[in-house]
Amino acid sequence: MRDRYQVFGQDDGIILTTEGNAEIMRSKGLILGYSLLYEFDADTPEEAHAIHNLRQGWKPYKPEGKPDNCPQCNAIYYPEDSGMCWRCGRIDDENKRP
């Protein structure tokens, strides 16, 4: 489920986004003047934020809500944050076991 994440920066800020979203932002002129600082792969948005915070020298990223076990594979995921399991992808009501 890995996505490519890109980090763009300019004097007034930094943007962390997926490569696909960066393409959309670029086509709309939303990241004009921003430079690509770095890119990396991550399995979930929570993992991407953790890597990004580490590279920026910021406090560790703390996902929203409490961790839970994925109803499909039992891996840890954050249903109140991205709701994505690093093994199964997005977990929603249709993907949950009865």
Image (cartoon, rainbow, N blue to C red):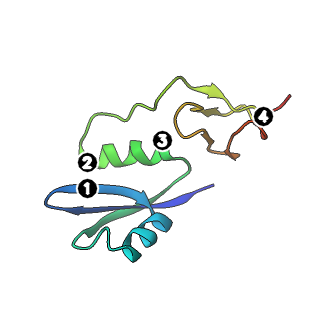
3 vs 1, front mark: 1
Q: CA distance from mark 3 to mark 2?
A: 15 Å
Nearest to N terminus: mark 3 or mark 2: 3
The residue to which callout 4 is attached is 96
The C terminus lies in quadrant = top right
Q: CA distance from mark 4 to mark 1?
A: 36 Å
89 shown above or below 64:
below
Q: Are marks 3 and 4 in contact (CB under 8 Å)?
A: no
Point 54% across, 40% down: residue? 82
Q: Nearer the viewer, residue 84 or 58?
A: 84
Q: Nearer the viewer, residue 79 or 43?
A: 79
Residue 81 is left or right of residue 25, and the answer is right
Q: Amino acid at mark 4?
A: Lys
Q: Nearer the viewer, residue 78 or 47?
A: 78
> Which numbered dot is residue 46?
3
> Which numbered dot is residue 14?
1
Q: CA distance from mark 4 to mark 2?
A: 36 Å
- Callout 4 environment at 10 Å: few (<14), some (14 to 19), or many (20+)? few
Nearest to N terminus: mark 3 or mark 1: 1
3 vs 4, front mark: 4
Q: Amino acid at mark 1?
A: Ile
